[in-house]
Image: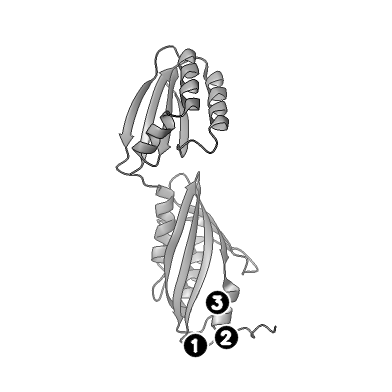
Amino acid sequence: MTFVQLIECRTSRLDEMNRLMDRWVEQTKGKRTATHSVVAKDRADASHIVEIVEFPSYEDAMRNSGLPETDRIFQEMVALCDETPTFTDLDVVRDEQLYSATARRFFELAPGEGAAPAFNDVFIEDYHDHDPARVQDVIGLDAMRREVEVWRGGFDFSFTIEDQMAQGDRVCTRWTFRGRHKSDFLGIPPTGQDVTMTGTTIHRCTPDGKIAEGWWQYDRLGLMQQLGALEPLEL
């Protein structure tokens, strides 16, 4: 279970504290067990500073606290504070990347038969899609729905999400496409062939959680080979 430590203090020397934290990061390379750190300033009280540090577990946090570098930096941090910092130890009981959930919803909704779903809760109206396999980008929600319908028309398929990472307003999804070629697809007559394709998609999300832009990279060449649309490579 992920563990979070909340450190609160009061100081008017935030710049010095930031330099102190930079030094700790440099000195603990290859040793520290903290995976994520956020330092925040209270809008209502500029002297109230909160640091949120994430660890894989409580045990990892204790090992991190036991580092001599951590102890030295903490003593210097106390000297910069108006009062002794307070610590709150928190076991994380729910951790949901909301932008990631929107990206997952697209991969869940895209497969199916017939007309594509509305996708109104997934994409903004002027969504912009970048795909190196297309001469022109797909722009607009309706155009994206038509693109999905091309794949629905050609295959019975599903997506498996292998990995997903989120940072800021970007979500990166590594996926596997599995399908059966049932109908004409880009001029290729139905083969009944079972196919597999891997790829990665990066989505940019808006503050309200919808997807505004997407960039695709996938093994289209491998897909075409499985469909018999390419001549075997000569050695």
* Numbered disc 1: secondary structure: loop
Q: Residue at x 39, y 59 (%)?
A: 105
Percent x, y of residue 30 = 53, 39
Residues 151 and 235: in front is 235
Q: Residue at x 53, y 28 (%)?
A: 24
Reading the image, the residue beneath label 2 is 228
Which mark sits nearer the N-terminus, 2 or 1?
A: 1
Categorize mark 3 by other alpha carbons within 10 Å: few (<14), some (14-19), many (20+): some
Reading the image, the residue beneath label 1 is 191
Which mark sits nearer the N-terminus, 1 or 3?
A: 1
Dots 2, 1 in contact, CB < 8 A: yes
What residue type is disc 3 on?
A: Leu
Determine whether 27 is above or below 104 in the image.
Answer: above
- How far apart in space, not on screen, are marks 1 and 3 (Cα)? 12 Å
What residue type is disc 1 on?
A: Thr
Residues 144 and 131: in front is 131
- How far apart in space, not on screen, are marks 2 and 3 (Cα)? 9 Å
Determine whether 177 is above or below 210 in the image.
Answer: below
Q: Residue at x 56, y 30 (%)?
A: 27
